[in-house]
Image: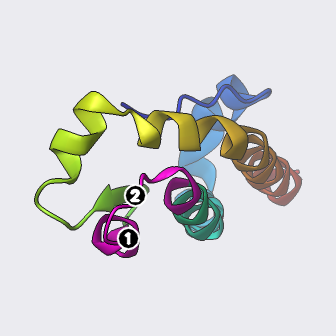
Amino acid sequence: MGLEVQIKNWDEVQRRWGEAPDVVRDQFQKAIDASLPEMRSAARRETPVLTGRLKAGIEYESQPLKGVVMSTVYYGVYVHKRNPFMERAIRPSQDIVIQRFQQAIDNILNHLK
């Protein structure tokens, strides 16, 4: 399960990536890092609550050019199989994530002008 983002001007960024790889990497990492807290909050809002441990165990991890929102509670995957709360959480966050990545693309292309 994941969030697929389609961005305008992506082909141009791919073509010109080698001209400023540090700028491209930094802009994308900023978009990822800015999106993760919002996605974690959305996941927590959708998490079913019995004791509160599952909700409290929703965390995120930022890695180079990758971000992950996950349950740190071992039974989170089993709850998700019966109640796909993480999938429901992604939908409301999608627009803001797309906006952040679109801004990153615009910043990259402005830098390459």
Q: Residues within 10 Å of mark 1 (few under 14, many from 20)?
A: some
Q: Residue at horizontal 38%, vertical 70%?
A: 59
Residue tagged 2: 69
Q: Residue at horizontal 16%, vertical 41%?
A: 78
Secondary structure found at label 1: strand
Q: Residue at horizontal 82%, vertical 57%?
A: 107
Q: Amino acid at mark 1?
A: Glu
Whether the magenta-drawn stretch holds residue 10 is answered as: no
Boundaries of the magenta span: 43-61
Quadrant of image for the N terminus: top left
Q: Which mark is residue 59?
A: 1
Q: Residue at horizontal 32%, vertical 57%?
A: 70
Whole-percent x and y of residue 15? 61, 30
Q: Amino acid at mark 2?
A: Val
Q: Would residue 4 appear left or right of 47 to someone viewing this image?
A: right
Above-or-below relation of 10 to 28: above
Secondary structure found at label 2: strand
Q: Would residue 20 appear left or right of 101 to someone viewing this image?
A: left
Whole-percent x and y of residue 94? 68, 39
Q: Would residue 52 appear left or right of 46 to someone viewing this image?
A: left
